[in-house]
Image (cartoon, rainbow, N blue to C red):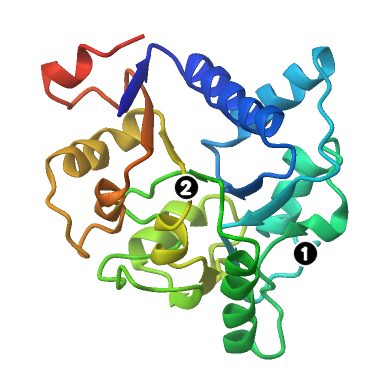
Amino acid sequence: MYKIFETVDDVSRYTAQRLLAKIQAMPRAILGLATGSTMEPVYAKMLQDLQHQPLDVSQLTTFNLDEYIGLSAQHPQSYNYYMHQHLFNQFKIPEHNVHLPDGLAADIEQACLAYSSAIQSRGGLDLQLLGIGSNGHIGFNEPQTCFNSRTHVVELSEQTRIDNGRFFSDQNEMPTHAITMGILDILEAKEIILVATGPNKTDIMAQLFHSAVDEALPASALKQHSNLTIVLDREAAAALPEHALNSVI
């Protein structure tokens, strides 16, 4: 199901409201969270709304999609740091209920196994929030990732390193590998919201719309999901066919 809005602000407000409604309806919800520039205004809207309508998040549990290998939680470009800066420092979920992959784990493979197991032991994710990369990756699941994958180590593609390298003052600091939740972990979520905004997402959203389900385009796996919402602004939706644009809100 597509939800197409005029502006990034509208997209962020709608997505934030969906997340807060889920928490209100399910105080013990297990949420899968994403990072990146697309999510910053979403989290900002959540925090803004919570100032006017506080929610008890003491029973909420979160699992983040991914983390760079080799960056500490205190590194300004780590996703642990991102989540605390943009959400957790004000969104007071008990720390023991917050889960992020450990990019400095002594045994990375074991840490990956434990991460997927922790999600499954809680009955899976109630809602997974996703962005999408310019090459169609979800999480850091690059093209040709097996759709049956669990949390694993991935070598970042050249395109992903180019896209994300802009956040590093020194391009040489950009990690080459990451831990990512697997595509199967994502698909087992009971509900998925994919958010894409801006002109740099126009091409990939058109590709996704027209694509068959194919491991060459990781996000195409989402077409198999029975409870998927794709939330776009006008710019990200600009190359979609007219019948999709008819759903503009």
Say the numbered circle drawn on residue 190: 2
Q: Is residue 245 left or right of residue 63?
A: left
Of 206 and 99, the residue lying toward us: 99
Which label was assigned to residue 147?
Answer: none
- Looking at the figure, which quarter contains the N terminus? top left
Q: Residue at x 39, y 63 (%)?
A: 183
Q: Which amino acid type corresponds to the residue marked 2 in the rendered image?
A: Lys
Q: Are marks 2 and 1 in contact (CB under 8 Å)?
A: no
Task: Determine whether, in the image, residue 27 is placed left or right of residue 127.
Answer: right
Q: Give the tally of numbered discs.
A: 2
* Rendered image: mark on residue 73: 1
Q: Nearer the viewer, residue 26 or 131?
A: 26
Q: How far, Cα to Cα, is label 2 from label 1?
A: 29 Å
Q: Is residue 240 visible?
A: yes
Which comes before the other along the chain, label 2 or label 1? 1
Q: Position of residue 6 (x, y in %)?
A: 38, 11
Q: Comparing marks 2 and 1, which lies closer to the viewer?
A: 2
In this orientation, which residue lies closer to the viewer: 223 or 73? 223
Label 2: state its secondary structure: loop
Instruction: Determine the image quadrant of residue 115.
Output: bottom right
- Dot 1: what SS? loop
